[in-house]
Image (cartoon, rainbow, N blue to C red):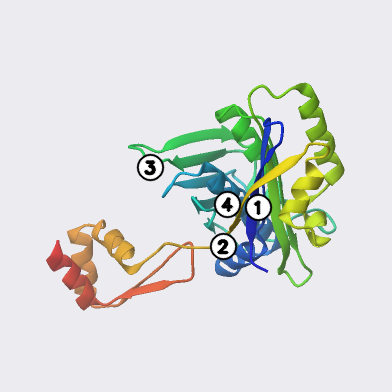
Amino acid sequence: MKDYMVRAMSKDGYVKAVAIRSTELVRRGAQIQKTTPTATAALGRALTAASMMGNMQKIENGSVTLQFKGGGPLGTILCVSDAMGNVRGYVQNPAISLLEKYQGKLDVGAAVGTNGMLTVIRDLQMKEPYVGSVELVSGEIADDVTAYFAQSEQTPTACALGVLVDRDQSVKVAGGYLFQLLPGAPDSVIDQLEQGIQKAGAVTVMLDAGMTPEQMLEVAAGALELELLEKTEVAYKCYCSRDRVTSTLISLGRQELEQIVSEKETIHIECQFCDEDYSFTADEIAEILKSL
């Protein structure tokens, strides 16, 4: 089954929502990064959140970047989504030891850490990107995304994310949802939404029971009536290319490139977001030098 997300709006116009099934894209990210279970859960949640935020932005050719830097053993987690919600990601230390709160419950918060920041970079196709940063609340990703919206964008938000890692360390299911209150929302709407989210329970339980993103939204919305607006397929997608890698090489400068040519060895540059390996012979580097 392909991953997809749905966007919706409450019929009273006070709440907008998005939900996603991200199982395949999280599997792909974990495969590329060669993550152990706790790293899989952390990266998967971050990829899921970035995908939803990228799709909600709706800026043609725009992007959203999430960077979690919490001082935990995972190091930095970096995820980038395009305007559709296609996403790619990177984790600095993917092979950390298993961390559990208790038997069968992965401790993502301890792996990410709380001594640091969540930085969100929104490329709105303007002269400068919008950059917002907040201190990490728990390292659990969803809590930190919720805090970001409340503090940096002054938007009351409820975010739930889940990645269920199976006994064989594969990704069984992954996904999440996000609700945002619009200006003027009365207390009755807030109460209904809170009750619905509490009754819905964990995202992984709903997904493991076979629920679709539409059904997750319906359950979590409680008594609120939602109108579905859009359904979009999403995937793990990297935009690296040989031309982009060549541009990176040029940025090293003439002296560095001349040193590479003098060593007469083939260099390999691997994309941190995917498993693509770009090789350049000394002769090819020499040709790049000529073009400078």
Q: CA distance from mark 1 to mark 3?
A: 26 Å
Secondary structure at numbered mark 2: loop
Q: CA distance from mark 1 to mark 4?
A: 10 Å
Quadrant of res 258: bottom left
* Cα–Cα gap, marks 2 and 3: 22 Å
At a point 83% along the width and 45% down the height, the residue shown is 200
Residue 51's tag is 4
Q: Earlier in the sequence, mark 4 or mark 2?
A: 4
Label at residue 119: none
Q: Which of pointers 2 and 1 lies earlier in the amino acid sequence?
A: 1
Quick one: 223 or 211, which is closer to the camera? 223
Q: Are marks 4 and 3 in contact (CB under 8 Å)?
A: no
Mark 2: few/some/many CA within 10 Å (<14, 14-19, 20+): many
Q: Name the amino acid type tagged 2.
A: Ala
Q: Which residue is mark 1?
A: 45
Q: Nearer the viewer, mark 1 or mark 3?
A: 3
Label at residue 125: 3
Residue drawn at point x = 63 percent, y = 24 percent: 183
Percent from the top left, x then y, of residue 129?
40, 38
> Could you say whether the residue bearing mark 1 is in a helix, strand or loop?
helix
Query: In which quadrant of the rendered image does the N terminus lie?
Result: bottom right
